[in-house]
Image (tube, rainbow, N blue to C red):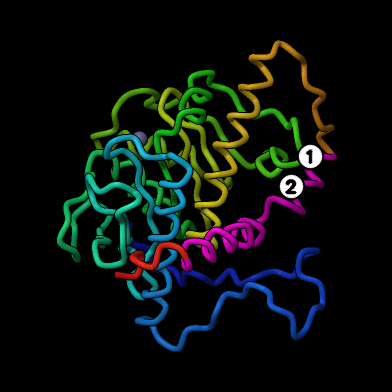
Amino acid sequence: MNTVVEPFQAKKKVSIYEPDQAGLIYPEIPEFKDHASHRQYLKERLVAACRAFAIEGFDYGFAGHLTVRDPEHPHLYWTNPMAVHFNQVKVSNLILADHEGKVVEGKHAINRAGFVLHAAVHEMHPDIIAMCHAHTVYGTAFSSLGKKLDPITQDTAAFFEDHVVIGEESGKVAVEVTAGHKVASAFKGVKAAIHQNHGLLTASRHSIDAAAFWFIALERCCKQQLAIEASGSKPILLKPEVARYSREHVGSEYIGWLHFQPIWGFLQENQPDMFD
Ligand SMILES: [Zn+2]
């Protein structure tokens, strides 16, 4: 299924975080005059997402992949190269791959086995334009419990009724395409998934920025819930209507994008080799 969609339709939404502040500095998604400038922008953002994952300590050998659809050819994805540390990903070593995991541009190989899940989700859900996956300490540990996050804080509310636990193919290294399809069919209408006995996945219909930030946030939520459970104390849960209300205000794609902008600004200034 190579459904061609018009990606990146989701523009910034007006929110409580974007009051009328004309003339003041505020992050904005630029307009693009052509595919080339749009592509360059997305590649830089993808590299920044990888560098952010390095800062967060999300590397585990060659595991983990981040993807964003090409603006001109949405059935193709830009992703990080095989066996390159997240901290050494740069614009020039990104690779462009198709649904089958074939590299169509770039010098490096792809983690084809790991890409099976990614490609299947992208192929089955044309609206998903970016995804992140890594084998993180807390997310992977939490995934072994086979349960969703509880709404224990305002931050966790961002994922309330907006993540799933996928039990299919749990703990089994995904090397076959059918395995990818089972996981992909469970990954619909939500921004995040906890793949049991494996790790975390996030998806965005908006930007790689949002997918990356929600991944960082999800790992943090897993860490917090594990810490509370280890303490033996019983947390007070948010009421469902409160968690839902908070999610509407703090859990949108735009808010995820906005949260990534300080990270982007920091990396842009401190890691200029990203643009090599
Ligand atoms: Zn994995």
Do the numbered discs 2 and 1 sit on residues whose CB atoms are within 8 Å? yes
Q: Is residue 92 above or below residue 143?
A: below
Identify the residue at image location x=80%, y=27%: 237
Q: Residue furthest front?
A: 270
Residue 63 location, x and y as percent?
A: 31, 38
Residue 78's disc number: none
Q: Quadrant of residue 223?
A: top right
Label 2 beta carbon within 8 A of ligand 1: no
Q: Is residue 130 left or right of residue 238?
A: left
Q: Secondary structure at mark 1?
A: helix
Q: Position of residue 261 (x, y in %)?
A: 58, 63
Q: Residue at x 31, y 66 (%)?
A: 91
Q: Give coordinates of residue 137: x percent, y percent.
A: 46, 28
Compared with residue 68, is residue 87 higher up or lower down, i.e. above or below? above
Q: Residue drawn 29% across and 47% down?
A: 85
Residue 50 horizontal/vertical position (percent)? 40, 53
Residue 90 colored in magenta in the image: no
The amino acid marked with disc number 2 is Arg
What quarter of the picture does the N terminus occupy? Answer: bottom left
Viewport quadrant of the C terminus: bottom left
Give the prevailing secondary structure in the magenta stretch.
helix
Residue beneath the point at 52% across and 59% down: 209
- Which label is found at residue 247? 2
Q: Is mark 1 within 8 Å of ligand 1?
A: no
Q: Which residue is mark 1?
A: 243
Which residue occupies the extreme bottom position in the image?
A: 33
Residues rendered magenta in the picture:
242-269
Where residue 94 sits, quadrant-wise, is: bottom left
Q: Nearer the viewer, residue 36 or 26?
A: 26
Closer-to-camera residue (193/53): 53
Ligand 1 found in image quarter: top left
Residue 85 shown left or right of residue 221 in the figure? left
